[in-house]
Image (spheres, helix red, strand yellow):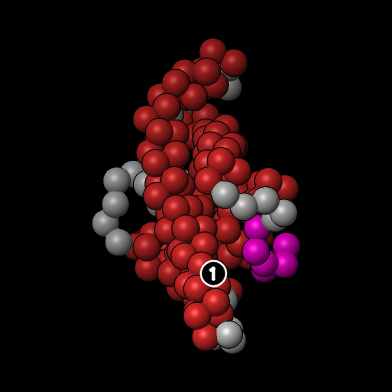
Amino acid sequence: MTRFLILFAVVARLLPHPMNFTPIGAFGLFAGARMPLLQALALPVIALLVGNIITGFYDARVLMAVYIGFLAGPLIGRAMLRARRGMVPVASAVLVNAIAFYLISNIGNWIAFYPPTFTDLMACYVAGLPMLLASIAGDAVYATLLFGGEAMVAQMKENRRDEGGHAV
């Protein structure tokens, strides 16, 4: 499952998409909820690294903050979704994840591109608000595909079990 998720995340990340509308946050949430912690933490890092090898790297301060920001997903997935299923827990985790990524990743932008003042940190966060909205939307779409797809497969197995008396 890990290889499939990494491949899916890399391919989805490389497809044309609006800025910050990526699958990495949702994949981190899903991995944190369904995989051992070290594998879950490795998934976004490997997907980002492969994507950066293909598309190129950028300012190391921003890059580091982005990678650290995406590590929040598996931790949030583990904390909020490991034992809970359903639309409300997933939607809540998506929101928390996007906000955590926004708060962490914008620190890298602030360090790289703004004067080191509190006022400029706030200016950086304000400038990043459109990216936060795109992250929420991307995480929501991909989390729906991942968690919704998982629920559909489980339901199909249950229906087959009910119809034929055995699991598929």
- Residue at horizontal 30%, vertical 61%? 15
Quadrant containing the C terminus in the rendered view:
bottom right
Please state the extent of the stretch shown in magenta in the rendering.
32-39
Residue 99, image x, y percentages: 55, 34
Asked if the stretch drawn in magenta spans residue 38, the answer is: yes
Residue placed most toward the observer, 91 or 54: 91
Residue 23 falls in image quadrant: bottom left
Q: Vertical placement of 76 versus 32: above or below?
A: above
Name the side, left or right, on which 104 lies relative to 155.
right
Instruction: Find numbered disc 1 in the image and state the secondary structure of the residue it sits on.
Output: helix
Q: Tell me if I can see residue 163 in this picture.
A: yes
Considering the whole magenta stretch, tell me its main secondary structure.
helix
Residue 41, image x, y percentages: 66, 60
- Residue at horizontal 43%, vertical 69%? 8
Residue 56 falls in image quadrant: bottom left
Q: Residue furthest top?
A: 119
Residue 117, image x, y percentages: 58, 17
Residue placed most toward the observer, 105 or 88: 88
What's under tag 1, amino acid-wise? Ala
Q: Which residue is mark 1?
A: 154
- Residue at horizontal 50%, vertical 73%? 159
Q: Residues within 10 Å of mark 1 (few under 14, many from 20)?
A: few
Quadrant containing the N terminus in the rendered view:
bottom right
Q: Vertical placement of 84 versus 36: above or below?
A: above
Asked if the stretch drawn in magenta spans residue 168, the answer is: no
Residue 154, image x, y percentages: 54, 69
- Residue at horizontal 61%, vertical 62%? 31
Q: Tell me if I can see residue 146 in this picture.
A: no
Q: Vertical placement of 135 versus 14: above or below?
A: above
Name the side, left or right, on which 153 lies relative to 104.
left
